[in-house]
Amino acid sequence: MSDQPHSESHDNVAHHVRRYLLVFVALICGTILTVWASYIRFPTREINIAVALVIASCKAFLVAGFFMHLVSEKKMIYGILGFTAFFFIGLMGLTIWSMGDFPLFTITH
Amino acid sequence: MEIPYTTEIRKDTGLYNAKVGIWLFLASEVMLFGALFSAYILLRVGAPDGYWPHGWLTVWLGTLNTLVLITSSITTVMAWASLKMKNFGSFKFYHAVTLCCAVMFLCIKSYEWRDEFIHNEVTLKEGAFKEGTIADGHLIKQTADTITLEGRIVKDRKDLFNLSTPFFGHPKQEEIEIKRSDIVKMSNYGPAHHDYNALYFTLTGLHALHVIGGACVIFYLWAFGRKMWETDPERFTNRVEVSGLFWHFVDLVWIFLFPVLYLL
């Protein structure tokens, strides 16, 4: 929405308000779904973790995409976020990579 | 001195300057929380089998806090939309609700932190209680000679880690009176208790600082914004948008903190 002119029409903003309300309802439903799914006994706990993170990612997309207007932003913002994503993935990748890499004589459980 | 590009769009970025600034700041925030999340992953994966806590927090309180933050997010975006529709009264109303949500979130969080600090794990002398050697529960009374916990006694410390906590928490547990002379070690569920607690307090503490910071900015705009709104409405609207972006980021972080700390 930020790429729209500052003299945005009243009707146009009103249209976006309806979208915000839909996103709000979706976020509430997502929260309920997250809690409900956490009480389901999947075959492994890893599935529980994956389900919870997928729902959280969907909710995060709704907040970032619509409340933060990322679905219609300028290239400059996407560029900043692209760099952020690159370094964030690198950080997580290094963390996962280091998991089995213990110094000599480390006592592991 | 006139600050350039507070409202007009820069040709090279296509944005006003504050917006580029807040996104760069949020990018650094992603890395800050990312580092803490990576610490969480590392410690959790490295924990011995059965010794990573499940069900230590009250799920309904976390759920309520999630709903409070989601509500504050919609009121923040509605406050901005109100200004776009030239309705300052509506802006005041929506941001008043945002501020109430921020205060409510912090009150609930404080209650939860207090709960951790009065929750104690007590290692008992062999033979002091036939049920076991570890007492766990909330400290409800203490005298010079005894302490009273509302909780339970277990044989194996592992029994304290995997709790199947119902949504509304455990029903009231029995009161256990323990002589101080029978206590070998006693520690509350503060940051030093376990890696999980250290991460819990660090992550939620840092997040709460962000809530306080964001609420202060929103309060300033809410309480003292009229003058700028009357003289330079577009600039004021941009300020509200930028503060809103920060607030949504705070909500976004909580969306991941909630399942990671409360449910998994």
Image: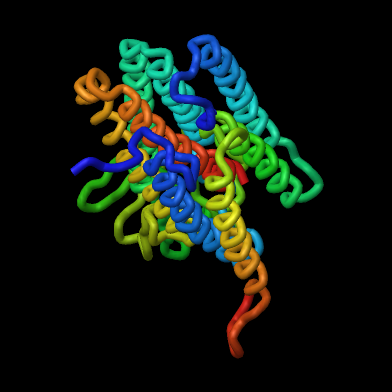
Q: Is residue B130 left or right of residue A47?
A: left
Quadrant occupied by the N terminus of chain B: top left
Residue B71 appears in the picture as rendered:
no
Question: In front here: A62 or B52?
Answer: A62
Q: How has the structure been colored for display? A: rainbow
- Quarter of image, res A89: bottom right
Q: Is residue B10 shown above or below B203?
A: above
Question: In front here: A108 or B212?
Answer: B212
Residue at image location 56% in from the left, 22% down from the top: A24
In this view, which residue lies farthest toward the bottom? Answer: A104
Residue A15 position, x and y percent, is 58, 14
Q: Is residue B43 left or right of residue A52?
A: left
Q: Is residue B100 shown above or below B134?
A: above
Residue B89 position, x and y percent, is 31, 11
Q: Is residue B59 left or right of residue B182?
A: right
Residue at image location 54% in from the left, 47% down from the top: A76
In this view, which residue lies farthest toward the front? Answer: B11
Question: In front here: B131 or B229?
Answer: B229
Residue B240 position, x and y percent, is 36, 29
